[in-house]
Amino acid sequence: MLRIPLSLICILTTIVLKVDANEPPPRVFVQWDNDLLSGSDRDYTNGARVAFVQDLDPNQKTHTFLQTSLYRLRGAAGGGLLDDYRFNDVGSTRFSWGVGVTQLMFTPDDFSTPAAPQGERPYAGWAGLEFSLHVKNDHSASSVTLALGTTGPNSYAGDSQTWVHENLSGSPLYQGWDSQVPGELTVNLHFDHKRRIDWLDCSIDWPIELDGYTEWGAALGNFRTDAYLGGVVRAGYNLPASYATPRVQIGSYGHAVFADAQDDDDPFSIFGFAGARGSAVLHDITLDGPVFRDFDTGVDREPFVGELLVGVGISWGNIDLSLSQTLRTDEFKGQDKNQIYGSVMLRAQWPF
C-alpha cells in the first residue's frame, strides 16, 4: 500500500492559505524528473517536487525575522565583487521566502535481483522539506535553502515506485528495495546564485531574442556536499522575464532576473534553451552511504560530474511550462552508461 506523507502536504497548504491577502500571491512550482521520458529505467529514475515562493515587500515592517535574514543575504549576494548588482538600491531589490517538498529515487538497471548487482547503482530514496530565503534584482538572484529529510523506508521511495508501476505505468516491479541505503536523518544547507548575462541584451529588438544566466552554488550536509558551476542560454519569441531551473534541484527556485521585455499585449512566449554544468562532489549519501552508520553501497563515487541540458518552454501570462532532457556523465566508477532523463516543470502564479 502506498503511504503518502500527508503531514507534509498539510504543512504546505497551511502556509499558502495563511499568506497575507495584501502580499503578492505565491508562485507554485511543480517539477517532475523521470528517466522513462528518455526511454530508460535506471540510476536517477524519478524526482518529484512541489514548492511555493512568496514575495515580500521590503518596505513593510512585518516578518521581522525574515526581513533581517534577507537583508543579510542581500549583503552576501551584493557585496564585495558583486557591488555592481546595485543591491544598495532598495527599490530594485526583491525579497522572498519559499517552502517545498521533494522526493528522489534511485535504482539499478536490473530490476529482478534482491539487491543491486555489482557495478550498478544501489537502491536509494530521499524525501524532505525545504525552507528557503531569496534576494534578487534585475541582474542576479541568490537563494539559501535548509533541507531536512530522510533516506531509507521513511522516504517512501520504494512504496511510491511500486504503486506507480502497479497502477499507472505497467512497468516491472523492482525487487531490491529491501536492500536500499538505510534510513538516516539528513540536514543540508544549499546556496545557489544566478547572474544574468547582460551582453545578450543586444538581441532585444531581434525577431528571435536571446538571454541567459551563469550559475554557481554549493551544498553542505550529510545528504550531499558539492559545488557546481554552469549556465543556461535561451532563444525564442517574446522571452519571459522569469527563469526557473527546469529540473528538480534542491535549493534552486524560479525568479525574475531578466529585463521584462514582454509585450503587454502579447502574453505568449515560446523558446528553446540549452545549458551545461560541472559539479565537484565530496559526498553523496545515495552513493557513499550514511555518515553515521556503516553501510557498503558497493560502488565508488566519481568526484566530478558533468551535465548537458536542452529543452523547450512556453509561457502564457503567469503560467510557464517546460520540457527538457539532461545528459549526465558517470556518477560512480564502472557505470556502463551515461544517464539521460527527462524533466517537466510547471510554474503558476495567481491570478493566471
Image (spheres, helix red, strand yellow):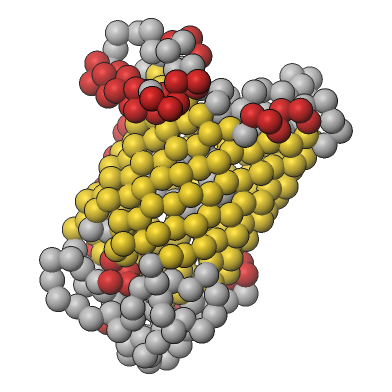
The percent position of residue 61, horizontal first and vertical second, equals: 30, 8
**Which residue is outermost to the front?**
81
83 w.r.t. 273: above or below: above
Q: Nearer the viewer, residue 23 or 76?
A: 76
User: Which residue is rendered at x = 69% and y = 42% of the image?
Assistant: 234
Q: Residue at x 36, y 48 (%)?
A: 218
Direction from residue 272 to residue 215 in the image, left or right: left
Q: Along the horizontal axis of the image, is 215 left or right of 326?
A: left
Does residue 210 appear in the picture of this structure?
yes
Q: Is residue 70 visible?
A: no
Which image quadrant for residue 151?
bottom left
In what quadrant of the picture does the C terminus appear? Answer: top right
Kindly identify the residue that appears in the image at 29 percent across and 63 percent down.
283
Q: Residue at horizontal 68%, vertical 48%? A: 273
**Residue 238 at x, y percent in the picture:** 76, 31
Q: Position of residue 248 (x, y in %)?
A: 47, 53
Is 234 placed left or right of 63 in the picture? right
Q: How many marks?
A: 0
Q: Does residue 131 sit above or below 344 in this rendering?
A: above
Q: Which quadrant of the figure has residue 58?
A: top left
| Of residues 128 and 19, the one drawn nearer to the viewer in this rendering | 128
Quarter of the rendering occupied by the N terminus: bottom left
- Depth check: give the residue in front, 138 or 316: 138
Question: Residue 216 location, x and y as percent?
Answer: 46, 44
Q: Is residue 218 above or below residue 339?
A: above
Q: Does residue 286 lie above or below 195 as drawn? A: below
